[in-house]
Image: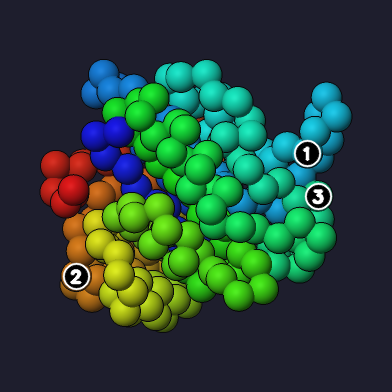
């Protein structure tokens, strides 16, 4: 692994997966090998007798290297509820995730890890996504869905990231809604407010066009 990032968001359902897949496409277009991981996922269905999650499948499909599902998504919970509730009978153990991460991490130049929910969303009864990012020792990218209320959520998350032993490597703006009022001004305000590079502004696209979204990244400003 030359570069790895932990992708968190200001909330659940804010564009983390779309932004991550677009980032995978971006790195591929740069000629890099890339893999993705979604260590903890709730809301899974059974395929060929095993629980699988849509986000994890997308990351698996978009990798340049074929990885076993278990390594992409060590914890797959059926119920679409917080992992600390969904996983009561099989709680997340960070060691298990770190082991899977270590198995795959040198199989590509770029490794992207999508978190579950937001920065302080729990992953078990006593740990949350910040503990996961710290355990993997990855710089963190923050995905912000540009909509009413996002400035508050983004500032709070940014402050929380900076209070932990992680590198805040950058943020990504995602237009998840077609008609947010003053969307450009919100992005401008966040650019002045968040003291980390803006790596891309992903436009609203009705159908997922990940190669199209990938063209909106400018990563030359990202820190390692
Ligand atoms: N660029 C975009 N254009 C239009 N809609 C988008 C875009 N990015 C995300 N969305 C919408 O937002 C939804 C949530 O995006 P996504 O699944 O990436 O969020 P997430 O943060 O990964 O969610 P989760 O917390 O469940 O993992 C998508 O299903 C899609 O409807
Ligand atoms: Mg997701």
Q: Is residue 15 left or right of residue 52?
A: left
Does the residue at mark 1 contact the one at mark 3 (Cβ under 8 Å)? yes
Judging from the image, the colouring scheme is rainbow
Q: Is residue 181 left or right of residue 87?
A: left
Residue at 61%, 57% in the rendered image: 93
Q: Bin the neighbour count of mark 3 within 10 Å (Cα to Cα): few under 14, some 14-19, many 20 and up.
A: some
- Label 2, label 1: how many angstroms apart (C-alpha)? 39 Å
Residue named by callout 3: 78
Q: Is mark 3 within 8 Å of ligand 1?
A: no
Residue sitting nearer the eye, 186 or 98: 98
In this view, the residue farthest toward the left is 221
- Label 2, label 3: how many angstroms apart (C-alpha)? 38 Å
Residue named by callout 2: 195
Q: Quadrant of residue 83?
A: bottom right
Work out whether mark 1 precedes mark 3 in sequence or the reverse, and give the earlier one: 1
Whether residue 80 is visible, yes or no, is no
Q: Quadrant of residue 8?
A: bottom left
Work out whether mark 2 precedes mark 1 in sequence or the reverse, and give the earlier one: 1
């Amino acid at each position: 692994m030359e570069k790895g990032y932990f992708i968190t968001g200001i909330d659940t359902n804010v564009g983390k997966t779309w932004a991550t897949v677009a980032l995978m496409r971006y790195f591929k277009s740069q000629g890099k090998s890339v893999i993705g991981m979604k260590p903890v996922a709730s809301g899974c269905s059974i395929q060929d007798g095993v629980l699988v999650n849509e986000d994890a499948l997308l990351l698996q499909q978009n990798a340049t290297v074929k990885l076993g599902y278990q390594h992409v998504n060590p914890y797959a919970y059926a119920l679409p509820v917080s992992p600390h509730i969904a996983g009561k009978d099989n709680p997340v153990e960070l060691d298990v995730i770190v082991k899977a991460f270590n198995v795959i991490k040198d199989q590509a130049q770029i490794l992207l890890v999508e978190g579950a929910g937001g920065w302080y969303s729990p992953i078990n009864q006593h740990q949350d996504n910040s503990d996961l990012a710290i355990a993997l020792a990855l710089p963190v990218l923050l995905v912000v869905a540009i909509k009413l209320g996002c400035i508050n959520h983004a500032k709070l998350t940014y402050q929380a990231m900076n209070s932990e032993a992680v590198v805040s490597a950058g943020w990504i703006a995602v237009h998840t809604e077609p008609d947010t009022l003053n969307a450009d001004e919100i992005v401008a305000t966040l650019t002045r407010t968040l003291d980390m590079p803006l790596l891309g502004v992903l436009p609203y696209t009705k159908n997922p066009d990940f190669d199209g979204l990938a063209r909106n990244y400018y990563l030359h400003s990202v820190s390692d």
